[in-house]
Image (cartoon, coloured by chain):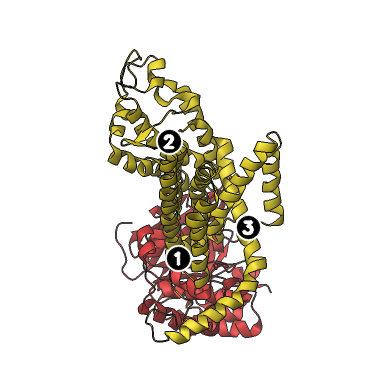
Amino acid sequence: MKPQSNRFMSMQEMVGFAILALLIFVIFPLILDPFRLNLFGKYLTYAFVALGLVLCWGAGGILSLGQGVFFGLGGYCMAMFLKLEASTPENTKIQSTPGIPDFMDWNQLTELPFWWQPFHSFTFTVIAVVLVPVIFAFIIGVAMFRRRVGGVYFAIITQAIAAIMTILIIGQQGYTGGVNGITDLRTLMGWDIRTDEAKNILYFVNGGLLFACLFAAQYIRRSKLGRILIAMRDQEDRVRFSGYDVADFKTFVFCAGAAFAAIGGAMFTLQVGFMSPSFVGIVPSIEMVIFCAVGGRLSILGAVYGALVVNWAKTTFSESFPELWLLGLGALFIAVVLAFPKGLAGLYDDFIAPRVKPLFDKLRSKSNSKDADFVGAPAE
Amino acid sequence: MNYVNPNFVLMVEGLTVSFDGFKAVNDLSFYVEPNECRVIIGPNGAGKTTVLDLICGRTKATEGSVKFKGQELLKMREDQIVHAGVGRKFQTPSVYEDLTVFENLEISYPKGHGVFGALAFKRDLEVIERIEQITQTIFLTDALDEKAAYLSHGQKQWLEIGMLLIQDPELLMLDEPVAGMSVAERKKTAELLNRIIQDRSVIVIEHDMKFVEDIATRVTVLHQGQILSEGTMEHVQADPKVVEVYLGH
């Protein structure tokens, strides 16, 4: 007897990835008008965050209620670059200090702060988009997990961090654009990002990056590290006494979640054209957890569907019943927790998978007999 | 003490832990020799499990010293103590319920224990062979792909013993390995333990006197956090103090 397959993906997962790819890269672009497609692109940026939460919360049992912070940091890094590009001396010549972002001028700043300087460089910006949130997550992770802070306490602390971050951004108006955020972004290295065509391209870039992150997440889940995360969720002490430093693993997965969220944030800025504290604080952070919960916190593909479905519902319902939407979202969250704790992915596993499984088995036995001596094929 | 006696694997000296003033373990000293099987017995609340917790770093000691092959364990983290060569089995079987028997053992395999080591860890032939060999020892060959949650209580205990074996510790600490087992399972476990306590030092906590007689090199009787008696099984059984507080008349 051989232990279960150690392959990167099962046949069923491969089909799942393929269907999602078809949906994102073919079906949506075909059936949606440019405005709606851009909207779906925005929804998909939240899928990055939900994906990170699947790793942290679903696999590792670490519930972060502050993912908006990392989404925001990634988004702000990108926004700073775009804002500097938009604030050429010609564009800003009516200001008392031309060449600096307009909100700085309004706040009587006469010079670009030193920590804004490096964001003139696109390479630096791309690195910063990922690295700034990861370093921040690393500091939080080390501080919390080394002291064995976990569970509810960790959730509350991340929530407090989200609140602090919002207050900080709003309070430092001259440096951050305050409550309005960083707006009026125009070009990316001379390329106008406001046109329909640009938005179309950005949608596909976003989809590509999402798939890169999905593959990375799948790699982590299939590695021994993924199994250690599950082991940690069940029996943290046992993992320690199997010779693992639990804090290191928690910090790693928290940083990975932050990196995913940050990429989503940067793509959000590019597609939506601004970044503001309203995507950083407690409410958006909790909404992100709801995307993940609705999609199914144990399923990386579920996270994408969760982000899509909840955001689509949000747009649709808040267009017709703006007051009722938040109540509806709350009700949805309660319904998920009470009735289907594994989310959409759980519903799929319970009702659809048993029906399609015979199909896969048939397919597999066919392909197995076809290339029976293929080296990589798992022997049963 | 400055010198290290090379004859002792474990030297526990003046070990004390107090929880809000209550001394669960009080100025305890004992020494374990290579290949010795030391059994700790004593009434409930004597501090037996606490002693193991202190040695493996789960509980921090208030005072004293625990030296394993000359290394001071009290200053080390749990995972560092494991890497030094100390393995610990808990009283209630603690296995990873959501993982298969194979995966449970694989996690305990002493390789790829850093974050990036775990990411790059390859399930090569050596790992698979070692795991198959261990599953044979612990009677779980047929359950290799079974989730640990579906194992019986006895099988979970065996699995946890297997997880320790794969670490190949020099000092193995077992907390009531036969508790809650059926008679048949108990017999099999005794046989298993007898086999694996060769070539290493073992500290066992156990209540089953028949079982203790079978495996013990020396017995330490704990009472209220202190040593009541120590020596061979016969010596301890004949000690009137032990009869008084533990064995009964």
Horizontal and vertical percent for residue B101?
52, 75
Horizontal and vertical percent for residue B171?
42, 70
* Nearer to the camera, A239 or A168: A168
Say what amino acid the circle numbered 1 marks: Arg
Q: Are marks 3 and 1 in contact (CB under 8 Å)?
A: no
**Mark in front: 3 vs 1:** 3
Which residue is located at x 51 percent, y 53 percent?
A30
* Nearer to the camera, A108 or B13: A108
Q: How far apart are marks 2 and 1 (CA)?
A: 40 Å
Residue identifier under label 1 = A222
The numbered dot on residue A344 is: 3
Do discs 2 and 1 share a chain?
yes
Q: Is residue B32 above or below residue A126?
A: below
Q: Which chain is red?
A: B
Chain letter, disc 3 residue:
A
The numbered dot on residue A194 is: 2
The numbered dot on residue A234 is: none
Give the SS element for disc 3. Answer: helix
**Mark in front: 2 vs 1:** 2
Which residue is located at x 31 percent, y 33 percent?
A119
Say what amino acid the circle numbered 2 marks: Arg
Chain letter, disc 1 residue:
A
- Whether residue A342 appears in this view of the structure is no
Total numbered labels placed on residues in the image = 3
